Amino acid sequence: MAQGEPALVLSDTDSAEDLEEVEPSFSGITIELQDEESTSSDVICLDSLEEIMPATPSSPNRDFIAHEVNENQRSIEEICICCGSFQIHTQHPLFHGGICTPCTENFLETFFLYDEDGFQAFCTICCSGKTLLMCDDPTCNRCYCLECLDVLVSPGTAEKVKATNTWLCFMCLPLSSHGLLKRKKRWRVKLKCFYDQESENHLEIYQPLSAWERKPINVLSLFDNIATEMKNLGFLGSSLGDGRLTYLDDVTNALRTDVKEWGPFDFIFGSTPPVGNSYEHPPAWYFYQYHRILQYGKPPESSQRPFFWMFVDNLVLEKEDRETASRFFKTEAVTIHRKHAETVQNAVILWSNIPSVKSKYSLSDLDLDLDLLAKNILKTRLLSQRPATLVRKFFLPLREYFKCFS
């Protein structure tokens, strides 16, 4: 994949008028995703996230989308461009075309899921796909499955993409129309409206920003320094990312005026100490102090500025404290576990407004006894990992809003 800046002039593809059709250049970069059965659960296994294949409804109609539109004069808005169904629920947020109820649910669950390489885990169009082609624009993280390219653009498009060196995807090219695939104007606005209106858990997202609108991120990290994770993901330590991180281990004496002076912050992270480690305060102290600082650091509710937060419990909070945290944060907790073979080695519980955290996809319906797991970690003297090592992948959607480098 190209590492430098692509040879193109950036333009606002949300509002740019369609340009004269040109032959796009293509790239041969592919990644293979294993087909695994997925289930709905509030437990997510990080080791297997890149292997989760969302269940996209199979339909014999998808191969005939072009025939229905070109020969039968059926409007693309009457066909689900993800699976070919005629049972339309609403309209696709990014491209002209319909989307059925199952594909809508799948889109909501997977669009903000990312792999460790920084790219989307699933196809930008159908949010599924086994073999994905990645955009070569260093500011883009989109992927597209071979089937979407051949069905919606034209037969043989996937092979053309794989045969060339540099490919700018359908969200990056100034030309908005490619065969039946036509990018919507103001798609970022439509994506936000799609989530606001369709998400069953009332997950409201911030409108993603174009690459030239993104600014370096300013992070406040409490009780656990996530500088290494943020640097490895490209947010810190580069002329492109060039973000800033403030780390505080003790905020007992921190006042509202202090937080305002240090900020404004774009992301506030906090955690309890890892289980088995020594800590100076009762476990609940870390939650209450984090919540206090969060109130000081977050923007007014009327603000449209993207602002994210995450608090992680490394199995040291009591059940009553976790329930209190859910009430304070006004969202349910999600359990993340890491397995080796069939053995769960570690788990954390987190609360966050980052969209990927709320995905229900998991490889198992594992019912974790968290208290027993914490006791086993202590008994075997296998100290659990720092919380950030288990949740770093969930930082990746921040690339939609802040500068980073590959």
Image (cartoon, rainbow, N blue to C red):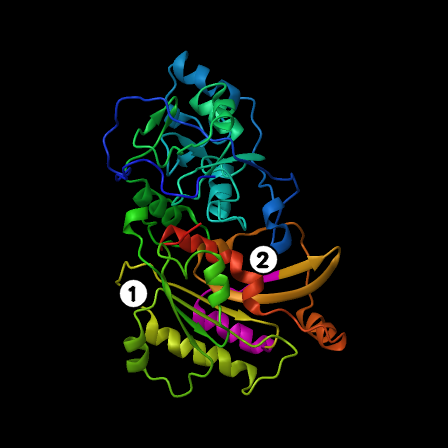
Residue 157 spot, x, y in % from top left: 47, 22
Q: Please tell me whether residue 110 is drawn above or below residue 123 in the rendered image.
A: below
SS under mark 2: loop
Q: What residue is rendered at 44% in x and 34% in y?
A: 99
Q: Which residues are magenta?
A: 317-336
Decide if residue 61 is on the left or right side of residue 199: right
Residue receiving disc 1: 301
Is 73 on the left-hand or right-hand side of 40?
Answer: left
Position in image of residue 74 (x %, y %): 39, 18
Q: Amino acid at mark 2?
A: Asp
Residue identifier under label 2: 42
User: What x and y, as percent, mark residue 59?
Assistant: 56, 26
Query: Can I make out residue 129 in this image?
Result: no
| Residue drawn at point x = 59 percent, y = 67 percent | 348
Q: So how many labels did they put on this image?
A: 2
Looking at the image, which residue is at 46% across and 51% down? 200
Q: Residue at x 46, y 49 (%)?
A: 112
Instruction: Choose the circle earlier in sequence order: 2 or 1.
Output: 2
Q: In the rendered structure, which amino acid carries the disc numbered 1?
A: Glu
Judged from the image, the secondary structure of the residue bearing numbered disc 1 is loop
> On screen, 231 above or below 251?
above
20 vs 7: above or below: above
Q: Is residue 58 magenta?
A: no
269 is higher (above) or lower (below) than 406: below
Label 2 neighbour load within 10 Å: few <14, some 14-19, many 20+: some
